[in-house]
Amino acid sequence: MAARGGFSSRIGFIAAAAGSAVGLGNIWQFPYVAGQNGGAAFLLIYVFWIFLIGFPIMLGEITLGRSAQANPYGAYKKYGGKVWGLVGLFGILSGVMILSFYNVVSGWAFGYFLETAFGNLLEEENFSTFFGDYVADFSDNLWFSFGFMAITAVIVLQGVKKGIEGSAKILMPALFVILIGIIIYGLMLPGAMEGVKFYLLPDFSLINGATIYSALGQAFFSLSLGMGGLITYGSYLSKKENIVSSATLVAIADTLVAFLAGLMIFPLVFSQGQSPSEGPGLVFVALPGIFQAMGPILGKVIGSSFFLLLCFAALTSTISLLEVAVAYFIDERKWPRRKAVLVMAFLIFLIGIPSMLGYGAVQSLTSFTFYEGTPKSFMDLIQDLFSVVALPLGGFLLSLFIATRWTTAKFSEEISHGTTNYKGSFLEGFLNIMIKFVCPVVLGFMFVLTV
Ligand code: PHE
């Protein structure tokens, strides 16, 4: 059997898992979703979900992976038989499909970085038109997403220690430095405080059932839960490490970056009197205009730093998404890592093509209408299916699996390795109740509501 890799230290695991968690979900999505849904009010609900449901599910995935020492399929199959193995396979499939569109958006960020740093993006006149033309241009999309996938593949090829851990240890600190730098600069701009107020004074009138559900989906996506990513990373973690404290740091880092991304973006947006509830275009349409207004040199520096930050965040996430599929082929099919990485990276890149085409290049992929809802692009459709629905469903099945097959006794036993006083503690009782009753009930209920 091909040797399974492993993280060299606790910090390595934390950097890699936080890298997986921190991504486009934090920097691109969170600020615009929060901007449309009551700012801090949304943030509060989001944090509530992270700690109530996200955290126990995260521990469930890491413990299952570390105990089974296997990819999601292998882990479920080991303790639950072939039928439960299907749940693991479904997670791997979700990861593949998420990566297929995630890589396309990462390609946009990559293209914007290159155009800002080395090209003439900031000389454009209308960024809305520019963005529309940009995403509708098939060859731009093709090359930038190919490039992004190639960088991801080169890192995953180097294996767990050198590639995944090594890159996360550089990219994550760099990301924090850039983020803090832009926040400080933004807060000094005239009008910035209006942005801070907009973001931090909660508007509860915008909260309803749909926002509460979307905050849960956002929490799942943001923590990379429900598709076996953390089962895979957990399988590379040594028994000596304390899972509870590592997971706490990962959840805090992820929430902190989402929070800080809002604190970076809203002061910038308000300093130019732009609309904070722009939607998905906030980062690609509103921000370039703001960088432009900073003048040619400063705009280039701050603008390219921002898009580089977006690329770093996305890269540590694409790495984790690719690794899930790769681990499956290494463990179950005995493929060498090289073959698994090259085949899967190329295949997933190809699966992403319809998502690229759905922004104008091919008309029939741009709008699908169901019921009386607003028309959706192909990418939105895949995102709805494999992220909005599949991730909370994956979390539901994981908690059900622990409650009914693997047992909370094993869950608790696995957590206790690497701790001194977990057994018999209040925390143990709390986590067992969460994973056995609260998670399945809340997630099951939410799932029924969406379908
Ligand atoms: N957590 C990542 C983000 O916030 C996305 C992701 C989802 C990565 C699922 C891996 C698995 O952008």
Image (spheres, rainbow, N blue to C red):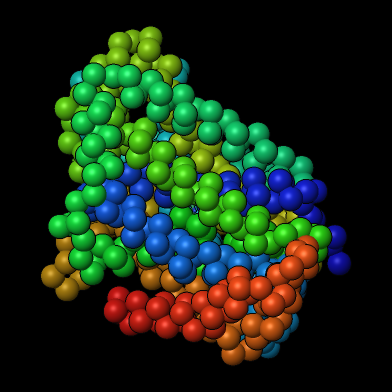
Task: In the rendered view, tell whether residue 225 sits above or below residue 133.
Answer: below
Task: Determine the residue positioned at 38% across, 9% down.
Answer: 297
Residue 132 visible? The answer is no
Task: In the rendered view, tell whether residue 401 sits above or below residue 430.
Answer: below
Task: Determine the residue positioned at 46% across, 31% down.
Answer: 179
Q: Nearer the viewer, residue 56 or 137?
A: 56
Q: Position of residue 206 (x, y in %)?
A: 17, 57
Q: Quadrant of the C terminus?
A: bottom left
Residue 149: quadrant of the picture: top right
Q: Quadrant of the N terminus?
A: bottom right
Residue 253 visible? The answer is yes
Q: Nearer the viewer, residue 50 or 374?
A: 50
Residue 49: quadrant of the picture: bottom left
Q: Nearer the viewer, residue 302 or 351?
A: 302
Q: Position of residue 363 (x, y in %)?
A: 24, 53
- In the image, taking residue 84 as reference, residue 313 lies left or right, namely left
- In the image, taking residue 93 as reference, residue 323 lies left or right, namely right
Task: Determine the residue positioned at 57% across, 65% down.
Answer: 58
Task: Determine the residue positioned at 67% across, 38% down.
Answer: 169
- In the image, taking residue 291 as reference, residue 93 lies left or right, namely right
How many numbered marks are there?
Answer: 0
- In the image, taking residue 40 as reference, residue 423 lies left or right, namely right
Task: In the rendered view, tell whether residue 35 sits above or below residue 394.
Answer: above
Task: In the rendered view, tell whether residue 307 sits above or below residue 198.
Answer: above
Q: Position of residue 414 (x, y in %)?
A: 73, 73
Q: Nearer the viewer, residue 264 or 69?
A: 264
Q: Position of residue 126 (x, y in %)?
A: 20, 26
